[in-house]
Amino acid sequence: MAARGLFRAVIMGPPGSGKGTISERIVKMFALQHLSSGDLLRHNIHGKTEIGLVAKSYIDQGQLVPDDVITKLILKELNTMRSNNWLLDGFPRTVPQAIALDEAHQINSVIDLNVPFQTIKDRLTARWIHPGSGRVYNTEFNPPKVSGIDDITGEPLIQREDDKPETVTKRLKAYEALTRPVLEYYRNKSVLETFSGTETNKIWPHVHAFLSTKLPAVNKE
């Protein structure tokens, strides 16, 4: 279990709910060490580690990485952070993963970003990128000057596979099926805090106020 006095938190929410932005602000304000399961997985796949190669074999077949594989990867990394307060992002995604995490570390708070699925669909499907530079446009609030064209190069914009309407719907359904039971698991353990809204900038002050009751802020906004 975690050493006494350390703060360990998990952030949860559907794809496109603003987890990345909220996580960055939490890390900056409260000096938590941030561990993203997605980043860690990509790093291991890119580095062709043993566990990365195993994970890639499942991903290449369009399958989810099995609980035991991703759990082993995450717990190994968390072992290097034993003396730190940390924020875990993207894990656990299933109840067995949550149970395994609990057996290794005491979780103080689970921050759930409850953003309506329709808002997420509108947000993600409005996103277009310039593949050469990675520049991101949003047809709702940051559109290109000419529809479908990059402002700087004049080259065509593309929509990532993950941002296409049918893919977004599929991802949200998968989240609903797999991760909702995890929220119930943490609700039953009385560590779940849910923050609802449609805009990250309006959700953030509530997350900040909640964490301020748990941790001293190290940076001013």
Image: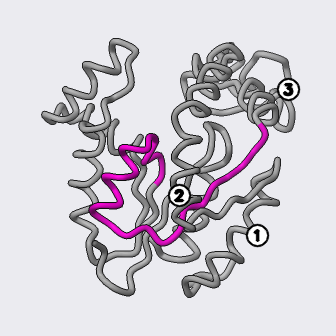
Task: Give the crowd class for mark 1: few <14, some 14-19, many >=20 residues within 10 Å.
Answer: few
Relative height, residue 152 to residue 8 (above, below): above
Using residue 114 as the reference point, say whether residue 80 is left or right of it.
left
Image coordinates for residue 14, horizontal then vertical, percent:
63, 40
Front disc: 3 or 2: 2
Name the amino acid, label 3: Lys
Distance between the alpha carbons at the discs numbered 3 and 2: 45 Å
In this rendering, the count of numbered labels is: 3
Disc ID at residue 79: none
- Report the residue marked by disc 3: 145
Distance between the alpha carbons at the discs numbered 1 and 2: 23 Å
- Report the residue marked by disc 2: 186
Relative height, residue 212 to residue 123 (above, below): below
For the C terminus, which image quadrant?
A: bottom right
Q: Nearer the viewer, residue 219 or 168?
A: 168
Name the amino acid, label 2: Tyr
- Report the residue marked by disc 1: 205
Q: Earlier in the sequence, mark 1 or mark 3?
A: 3
Using residue 53 as the reference point, say whether residue 147 is left or right of it.
right
* Residue 126, quarter of picture: top right
* Residue 173, quarter of picture: top right
Task: Give the crowd class for mark 2: few <14, some 14-19, many >=20 residues within 10 Å.
Answer: some
Residue at the image point whose x is 78% and y is 54% from the top: 196
Relative height, residue 106 to residue 179 (above, below): below
Front disc: 1 or 2: 2
Image coordinates for residue 184, horizontal then vertical, percent:
58, 50
Residue range of the region highlighted in magenta in the rendering: 89-116
